Amino acid sequence: MNSTTAVYRDSLSTAIIKNLITVGLSASIIYINSSLVHTFKKHEVFNTNPRYILYIHLVIIDILLLIIFTLLQVLSYIIFTLPVPFCIILLLISIICSLNTPLTLAVMAVECHVAICFPLQHSQICTVKNVTVVITVIWMLSSLTILPDLFSILATESRDFFHSRVFCLRETVFRLPELEKKRTISNIVFLVIVWLTLIYTYFRILFAAQAAAANARKARNTVLLHGFQLLLCMLTYVYDLLLNGLTKLFPKGVLTIRYTISVFVHVLPRLVSPLVYGIRDKAFRRYLRKYLLRSLERKASELL
């Protein structure tokens, strides 16, 4: 077992500060994203539009990831270890959702490319049915990536292991060296596919945006935001590499390194999602503002 799976504990004051930061950030983002989901569900102009369906799919994934990440961190400080079956369930959902995020962003890049470069064919290609099929395929691909790991530990680990408690990390549950090699290979494959999609579609969008002066600024800004968000989400693939490398350089700072990298990988990228459509998109911003104002008025009336 490498140094990254060694278990250490923070002091009480450090633990409180870390949990307050995580819970505060996550709760704020979850509230904003939940408002976006509510706005999407209440208005047909959004829930029948393939672009917004993809976006809300991304937002829901963000909510799930934030809930699991916050739950795991808080529980790790309160009770320290978790039953192996419960940990496996949380890890499976987290890993699948983490893989779903960059794949969904890649599909959104393709949708933007079709909308700008092939506007006449966009309505035939990007339909609600096709988007639903694509989202299903995304979940299947992500699940097929991690399910072999589950089957491997079911076949190799003893029954006592599944009745034990562990500090809930991927490395403490999926312990076989072969699984680490397989994870590295699958991450590289996902990395290459998503980056090739990103490079091709966004450069095509940029060239098309330069040709259409009226939409150039908005298209370039969208490209930059999507690209930045995808770049942050790609940290999922290099999480283990960063953790191993930094802990070897600074072995005494393993707790701070693990916490900082986790926040950068699992929390901060979720800040970008509300910006892309929830704030920048005029239609979504208008309906979202109405919803938030009504919520504030309702709470104010309750207080009075």
Image (tube, rainbow, N blue to C red):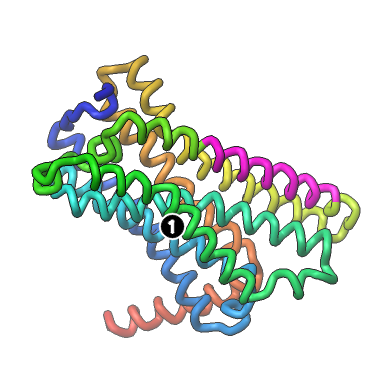
Q: Residues within 10 Å of mark 1 (few under 14, many from 20)?
A: many
Give the camera-side residue of 147 and 72. 147
Q: Does the rendering let one see residue 241? A: yes
In this picture, residue 81 sits left or right of residue 128: left
Residue drawn at x 36%, y 31% is 178
Q: Residue at position x 85%, y 71% from top?
A: 120
Query: What is the x, y in percent for residue 176?
Result: 29, 33
Q: What kind of secondary structure does the magenta stretch mostly adopt?
A: helix
Extreme-front residue of the structure: 155
Q: Residue 37: x, y in percent?
A: 47, 72
- Asked if 187 appears above or below 138 in the picture, the reply is above
Residue type at mark 1 is Asp
Residue where numbered disc 1 is placed: 62
Q: Is residue 235 visible?
A: no
Q: Position of residue 248 (x, y in %)?
A: 34, 16
> Residue 189 in magenta?
yes
119 shown above or below 163: below
Quadrant in which the C terminus is drawn: bottom left
In the rendered image of this protein, does residue 126 appear above or below residue 182?
A: below
Number of numbered discs present? Answer: 1
| Residue at 34% from the left image edge and 79% from the top image edge | 300
The span picked out in magenta is: 188-207
Task: Say whether residue 170 is left or right of residue 143.
Answer: left
Where residue 166 appears, as percent x and y from the top left, is 15, 41
Q: Is residue 59 magenta?
A: no
- Determine the residue positioned at 52% across, 41% down: 234
In this rendering, would 140 be left or right of 258?
right
Per the image, label 1 sits on a secondary structure element best described as helix
Task: Decide which of 276, 299 is in the foreground and name it.
Answer: 276
